[in-house]
Image: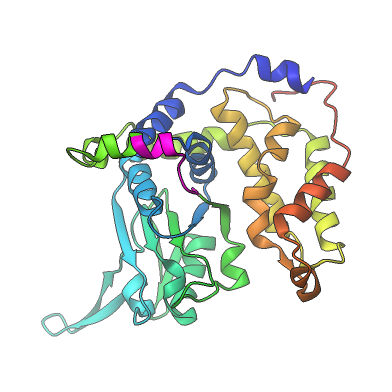
Amino acid sequence: MQSKTRIFDQPQPLVERMIMNVEKVIVGKRETIEQAFIAMLSGGHLLLEDVPGVGKTMLVRALARTIGCEFKRIQCTPDLLPSDVTGVSVYNAKTGEFEFRPGPLMTPIVLADECNRTSPKTQSAFLEAMEEKRVTVDGVGYELPKPFVLLATQNPVDYEGTYALPEAQMDRFLMKLSLGYPTPDQEILMLDRLQERHPIEGVKPVIVQDEFVQLQREAAMIHVDNTLKDFIVRLALATREHPDLYLGASPRASHALMRAAQTSAYIKGRSFVVPDDIKDLVLPVWSHRLILTSEARMTGKTAERLLADLLAAQQTPVLRYVSTK
């Protein structure tokens, strides 16, 4: 069933144009770009972790330009305050009232650059926005504009001047991705493109803000068979019961994996999810949420390896029929 279904995959034309638009800037990373759009179209937030200089910030800028939404950047530094992120109420002497001056978080697309260089207190300012898509300042709640998507970059936590993001914040990122170094041929092509001007200057919007929100709604309507929901829950239970894991996949993680699988099916032109949609996304959606025991880390085990083993041990469901209702 699975392989036959994939033969008839017809990529969603608009999403395909969006991916190709970003590829003008980021060379040879189609899978990562596609997964980034999966995260954003799922209504989730994206964390890019990698060494400096591989194009994390440039990928985020290209994604934002492609969507055509208002975009603001927060350069995370150790002295950044929560009010610098969410906004602040300022007293107006003429009116005798406090007025809210919104921070950069009140923007449809937000880049939190090097997010693990700011203090845990400021990192906590992102939590409400990421989960509820609203911020509270001086007891007053403010809704964030749709589609609110936080695109964060971070350097590996063993780099100087970095803080480990709290577990609650990591669980709110739908996906964590890494670009990695380009191949020699890809790096030569990158240098060719950079010789006269930076290709980001030529990136134009493919869609506008309302169109992107509509794509999110359409992706959320993709059918998920009950056997696939059971498959996701069985995987989550296996992580919670694994002796090498101090913290397994949360119910939020199960929901994130289902939403990502729906979006994966949608951009492939299908109205239903197949098992491969789930299996292809387990690692980028779950690996950053799992916490290994100290004993497991000392023996060199990783969350990615454990997830791969658990996935191999689970029986893949067979869909006898596909309902599109």
Residue at 53%, 32% in the rendered image: 218
Q: Is residue 143 above or below residue 17?
A: below
Q: Which residues are magenta?
A: 179-188
Q: Position of residue 153 (x, y in %)?
A: 44, 59
For residue 290, side relative to residue 12 (left or right): right
Q: Is residue 190 above or below residue 160?
A: above
Residue at 72%, 59% in the rendered image: 303
Residue at 47%, 64% in the rendered image: 155
Q: Camera-side residue: 50 or 88?
A: 50
Is residue 204 visible from the viewing direction of this image?
A: no
Q: Quadrant of the C terminus?
A: top right
Q: How many marks?
A: 0
For residue 34, side relative to residue 281 (left or right): left
**Looking at this rendering, what residue extends furthest in the front direction?**
184
Q: Position of residue 15 (x, y in %)?
A: 45, 29
For residue 161, side relative to residue 309 (left or right): left
Q: Camera-side residue: 181 or 307?
A: 181
Q: Position of residue 97 (x, y in %)?
A: 22, 81
What colour scheme does the image use? rainbow
